[in-house]
Image: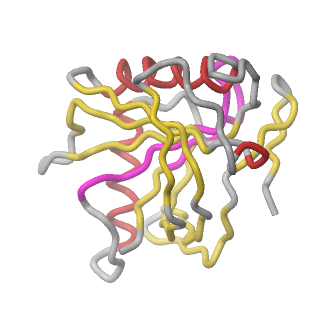
Amino acid sequence: MFGVIRNSLFGSVEGWPCQVLSRGEKEEVTYEERTCEGGKFATVEVAGKQFDEASKEAVLKLLKYVGGTNDKGIGMGMTAPVSITAFPDEDSSLQQKVKVSLRIPSQYQDNPPRPGDESIQIEEREGMTIYSTQFGGYAKEEDYVNYAAKLRSALGSEAAYRKDFYLCNGYDPPMKPYWRRNEVWFVKE
């Protein structure tokens, strides 16, 4: 049921349970439509900073939480992807606010440890259907904006999805230099 992502640096990482519904390619952009399970997520919001700086700050807080800085003092293990909610302006640049999320590992979904950091919130989210496209490298704001534009163009006007935000997902630890996986997700309406 839960996907496992193999990573030579950290062993196995629990993946967000998603199922591919369809694949497409248009204008040299490959994309998928997937349905993803809901569940509990640890989230941190950061405002007033550029995307890359805000994302890094929030990710470090979440890593401490899943690493044991919580009321039970237990390391829960890592899940993937790290999901960054980006909020585009009308010109497609990103606003200075992000919401970074990690799905709580399956064995802690029913009763997740309380974070030691008050800026971390536990949220219950519904399942969703998404359109996604994948790319490699060390992703920065510019990469996510560019791939969001490519996905938007490939989907055209037929696809109905949320325009007020999109998800920027990273699957790999920063120490992994090759074959990195990043994705942009648009949430289907």
- From the image, give the main secondary structure of the stretch colored magenta: loop
User: How are the residues colored?
Assistant: secondary structure
Residue that lies at the very extreme toward the left in this rendered image? 90
Q: Residue at x 56, y 51 (%)?
A: 134
Q: Residue at x 46, y 71 (%)?
A: 26
Tell me the quadrant of the picture where the C terminus can be found.
Answer: bottom left
For the magenta stretch, what is the residue range?
164-183
- Residue 24: give x, y in percent of width and height: 55, 74
82, above or below 62, in the image: below
* Residue 144 within the magenta-colored segment of the rendering: no
Tell me the quadrant of the picture where the N terminus can be found.
Answer: bottom right
Residue that lies at the very extreme toward the bottom in this rendered image? 158
- Residue 89: give x, y in percent of width and height: 16, 46
- Residue 164: give x, y in percent of width and height: 24, 56
Find residue 182 and report its image quarter. Answer: top right
Q: Residue at x 33, y 77 (%)?
A: 160
Instruction: Work out whether residue 126 or residue 83 is closer to the camera in this orientation and state it.
Output: 126
- Residue 47: give x, y in percent of width and height: 25, 27
Q: Is residue 152 left or right of residue 114?
A: left
Q: Is residue 73 left or right of residue 124?
A: right
Find residue 146 and report its image quarter. Answer: top left
Instruction: Work out whether residue 188 or residue 38 is closer to the camera in this orientation and state it.
Output: 38
Q: Residue at x 34, y 34 (%)?
A: 142
Instruction: Work out whether residue 133 or residue 186 is closer to the camera in this orientation and state it.
Output: 186
Q: Is residue 77 left or right of residue 80?
A: right
* Residue 169 within the magenta-colored segment of the rendering: yes
